[in-house]
């Protein structure tokens, strides 16, 4: 599997699955979630409502992921995942560690579901780095660290060809590029 980075709009990616930084209500929000629902049309929201009426009556817990149709998007599935809100300094180190693990879990669960569905290419946003306030560099270390680890452990089997991080803007792209370079080749 190849880990690639692209700067741009995730709704324009031609991939099998697009990961959405959703909120636990699954009923839409701003940021990348809003963009995905706008571009994908009402079918995605209808599928999310059906999930809320069924197995996810209380919403999707943080760190978990679930797939729906991609509606009109040039993909087969949207995989919704709920990132953690970045803790405040006064919440302390154990809480930061706990939420960092939840952020890693978003990527682990999203890619596990993608592989289970038979997706070969997946586009991923920088989960939690918008409204949820996660600093980009820390988010990049967690996101890329987790995906590299899954690859090293062979957890994704032969299923996926490409995990494509789609960064919104040059700053986010630059941070991910530097962290990927560091994690894959050393500083
Ligand atoms: P969260 O609530 O998880 O923080 P947001 O959607 O607010 O989610 O932000 C997550 C990241 O997605 C941010 O870095 C934001 O700039 C980025 N983003 C917003 N719109 C898009 C888009 N259309 N494509 C890719 N990334 C996007």
Image (cartoon, rainbow, N blue to C red):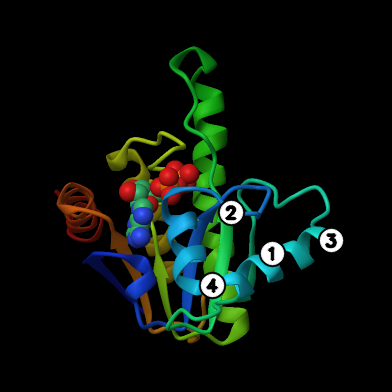
Residue at the spot of label 3: 53
- Please report contact status of discs 1 and 2: CB closer than 8 Å, yes or no: yes
Per the model, the C-alpha gap separating discs 1 and 2 is 9 Å
Label 1 CA crowd tier, 10 Å (few <14, some 14–19, many 20+): many
Residue 59 located left or right of residue 85: right
Q: Position of residue 13 (x, y in %)?
A: 34, 76
Q: Earlier in the sequence, mark 4 or mark 2?
A: 2
Q: Position of residue 160 (x, y in %)?
A: 45, 82
Label 3 CA crowd tier, 10 Å (few <14, some 14–19, many 20+): few
Visible residue check, residue 96: yes
Label 2 CA crowd tier, 10 Å (few <14, some 14–19, many 20+): many
Per the model, the C-alpha gap separating discs 3 and 4 is 20 Å
Residue at the spot of label 1: 48
Image mark for residue 41 = 4
Between tags 3 and 4, which lies in front? 4
Per the model, the C-alpha gap separating discs 2 and 3 is 15 Å
Residue depicted at x 58% and y 54%: 28
């Amino acid at each position: 599997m190849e880990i690639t980075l692209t700067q741009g709009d995730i709704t324009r990616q031609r991939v099998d699955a697009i990961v959405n930084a959703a909120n636990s209500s699954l009923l839409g929000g701003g940021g990348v979630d809003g963009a995905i629902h706008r571009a994908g049309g009402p079918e995605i929201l209808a599928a999310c409502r059906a999930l809320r009426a069924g197995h996810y009556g209380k919403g999707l817990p943080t760190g978990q992921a679930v797939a729906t149709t991609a509606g009109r998007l040039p993909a087969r599935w949207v995989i919704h995942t709920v990132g953690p809100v970045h803790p405040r300094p006064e919440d302390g180190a154990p809480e930061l560690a706990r939420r960092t693990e939840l952020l890693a879990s978003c990527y682990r669960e999203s890619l596990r579901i993608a592989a289970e569905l038979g997706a070969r290419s997946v586009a991923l946003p920088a989960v939690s780095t918008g409204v949820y306030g996660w600093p980009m560099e820390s988010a990049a270390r967690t996101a890329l660290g987790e995906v590299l680890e899954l690859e090293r452990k062979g957890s994704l089997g032969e299923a996926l060809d490409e995990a494509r991080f789609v960064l919104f803007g040059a700053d986010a792209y630059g941070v991910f590029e530097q962290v990927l370079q560091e994690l894959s080749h050393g500083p």
